[in-house]
Image: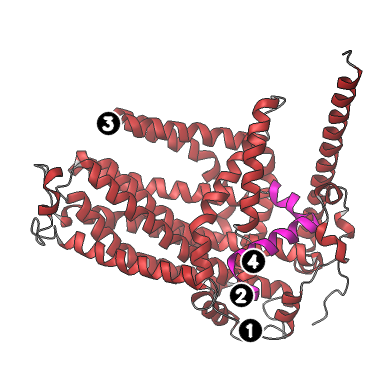
Amino acid sequence: MNISQSSYSSSSSSVNSASVATADPNVISSRRSADSSQTLASEPSRRWRDIFWLGVFLIQLVLMGCALTVLGLNRFKKTDRLNIDRYTQRFLENQRGLTENYWPLYALAGGVGTVLGWTWLLFLSSQANHMMKVAVHILTTYLAVISVLLFWMEQFFWGVAFAIGAVLQFLYVISVIDRLPFTMLVLQAAVKMVWSLREVMRVAYAFMLIMLLWMGIWSFGAAGVVASSIGDGGRWWLLVVLSISLFWTGAVLCNTVHVIVSGMVFLVLIHGGREASSMPPNSLMKSLRYAVTTSFGSICYGSLFTAAIRTLRWKIRGLRSKIGNNECLLCCVDFLFHLVETLVRFFNKYAYVQIAVSGKSFNHSARDAWELFQSTGVEALIAYDCSGAVLLMGTLLGGLITGTCSGIWTWIKYRDRVVMVGSTAMLMGMVLVGLAMVVVESAVTSIYICYAEDPLLIHRWDAEFFNQMSEMLHQRLQHRSSRAREVLTHHRFDNHTQETLPA
């Protein structure tokens, strides 16, 4: 296929933030790395990456499966079937239950989470924009209502926790309210791309079913823990361990879908359409095979850290933009901001596109993606975009609805277990809804990578969207340039003032 032959000069890879801030996005030439050229020209050679983390994930999966089976069976139809209670006599309580008493509560959570996820995918083309707007504006209210209910149930710790969450959510939305129009524009373009690739929707459905199968085992063990005779402290510790395992497993499946969809979207944009004659045959199956074999270790590795770092970065950015002239607080936040930015260089979601395209290791992919964004100035656009945060709000809202449904049923039957069941059911709902949301997020990351690699790829796909992105990029680069000049002028004025003061 014919691709633009213009390229960056060798010095562009080391452009600093000041020079990038003054760049004109309309004259940014395309950058094509050697790996991308090899991907386009021929089938890339794939090697197994991050094998250590693949082994760690599989080992924890096997061990967790065995532990969940034992914990569930110990209370299934008979108390202390496997005689485990003799090891916990110091924490023994009089209240005892059975696994089957609590397992249906988790079954409800799995059902509600699946319905919410499938509903999101079903209405993706027609109602996605409205659903995302509702998620942004209703989440704060929902958190506040749950906080009031928890106080009414005399669960003061969790009431305070949800109240703090509602306040933080409200402050974050206020801090990024001016960015939401552009965010919705990007999300609409991503939905348009995903809806044209119906096969990736089927991949999301399939992975949700796989997650449901694992959740059947997980909830069996979690119900056994809730029904056990261990004290509340022991039960909570066990549920925390089980929740971490479920979170990692869910993140791995979500990011596997991310890699599959990213590979498909990248190929569609590169080749100029789904029906292009140059489009490789069986593209979806190849992306799927790479994601679950050679690149699976990189997915397992990135899934451990990426979500936490992204969330922390969003919160710090929102706080940083609203500090004002408080230099002491600004200094502390800037320190945290630069620390997180360093981590983002090696742990970011755009690595999954590079993994899908070239099969690199996770850290190598993350570093290459971030250097590409910084050298082209597209990082300013990504920093302004809140699409990831909006999708996370939808995921949180789905988890809260799921946890509320299971929590209400638990309140009716076993009031002393409502928080345990409700919180873990919320995590189940978040994982299932997240598997639906990640389809759109994958398209967003691929669009940004392609825009940074060669803006003409986006122009050929959607000229109007390309013009809107280019205009916003130009505005953001001008904004950064003016801020840099303001800081430099302020610094020079302070130095001049200090020099003119009498001894």
Amino acid type shown at disc 2: Gly
Q: CA distance from mark 2 to mark 1?
A: 8 Å
Mark 2, Cα crowd under 10 Å, few <14 / some 14-19 / many 20+, is many
Q: Are marks 3 and 1 in contact (CB under 8 Å)?
A: no
Q: Residues within 10 Å of mark 3 (few under 14, many from 20)?
A: some
Is residue 241 left or right of 461 when viewed as pictured? left
Q: Which mark is residue 364?
A: 4
Looking at this view, name the residue that lies furthest to the front. Answer: 503
Q: Secondary structure at mark 4?
A: helix
Q: Residues within 10 Å of mark 1 (few under 14, many from 20)?
A: few
Q: In this view of the protein, which residue sits in the foreground, 100 or 464? A: 100
Q: Are marks 2 and 3 in contact (CB under 8 Å)?
A: no
Between the residue at mark 4 and the residue at mark 3, the CA separation in whole angstroms equals: 49 Å
Q: Contact, CB < 8 Å: mark 2 with mark 1?
A: yes
Q: Which mark is residue 45?
A: 1
Give the colour scheme of this rendering.
secondary structure
Kindly indicate whether the residue at mark 3 contacts the one at mark 4 (C-beta within 8 angstroms). no
Residue 153, numbered circle: 3
Q: Amino acid type of disc 4?
A: His
First in sequence: mark 2 or mark 3?
Answer: 3
Q: Is residue 370 magenta?
A: yes
Q: Label 1 amino acid?
A: Ser
Calculate the distance from the C-alpha at mark 4 to the C-alpha at mark 2: 10 Å
Name the residue located 43 percent from the left edge and 36 percent from the top edge: 143
Residue named by callout 2: 359
Residue range corresponding to the magenta coloring? 357-384
Q: Nearer the viewer, mark 4 or mark 1?
A: 4
* Residue located at (79% from left, 82% from top): 1
Q: Assess whether residue 401 is covered by the magenta stretch.
A: no
